[in-house]
Amino acid sequence: MNKLWLVPIISLILIICIGVAVQSSVDSNAEEASKAITIDNITNSIVLDYGYYTGELNAKFVSTKSMSANVVVEFYDESGSKISDADSYALTEADVEPNQKYTIKATYFNSQKPSKAIIKVYDDLGTSNLIYSKEVNFS
């Protein structure tokens, strides 16, 4: 009896298993990278000056493991709408060294007052794989 009909079924099962294993590995690496990151010493100097809000958000970035990092700072108004991406790339480091402090600096200039910022860390030099985010509320 010819059992060639089993080949496509077994192939499909193997492809699904490999896909699940790869995705689990990617999720695990992202979670590990997220736990390695600390962002602290956050300050902001955003003030109203001649009808525009202007200033900077500064922070320190530390990772306990080697990685590439791209940090983006997004500013939001009171309603939760995004009003600015600041400098888009507040920190771009191709080679983050373990336990080394890096400065995040995002310049803000807009007619709208920000009520919060979200600092987002991506594990590559693009913005495709978010591994960490921190919300900063302004008073």
Image (cartoon, rainbow, N blue to C red):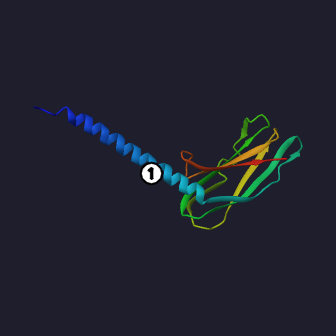
Percent position (x, y) of residue 68? 54, 58
35 or 95, which lies in front? 35
Which residue is depicted at the point 30% across and 42% down? 14
Name the residue furthest front: 1
Pointer 1: residues within 10 angstroms few (<14), some, or many (20+)?
A: few
Which residue is depicted at the point 55% across and 48% down? 126
Which residue is depicted at the point 16% across and 34% down? 4
Name the residue furthest right: 50
Q: Amino acid at mark 1?
A: Ser
Percent position (x, y) of residue 110? 79, 41
Above or below, comparing residue 88 to residue 93 in the picture:
above
- Asked if one can make out residue 124 in the rendered structure from this viewpoint, the answer is no
Which residue is depicted at the point 72% across and 52% down? 106
Q: Is residue 57 left or right of residue 124?
A: right
- Asked if one can make out residue 134 in the rendered structure from this viewpoint, the answer is yes
Q: Is residue 9 left or right of residue 39?
A: left
Say what secondary structure mark 1 lies in: helix
Q: Is residue 65 left or right of residue 88?
A: left
111 or 64, which lies in front? 64
Q: Which residue is mark 1?
A: 25
34 or 9, which lies in front? 9
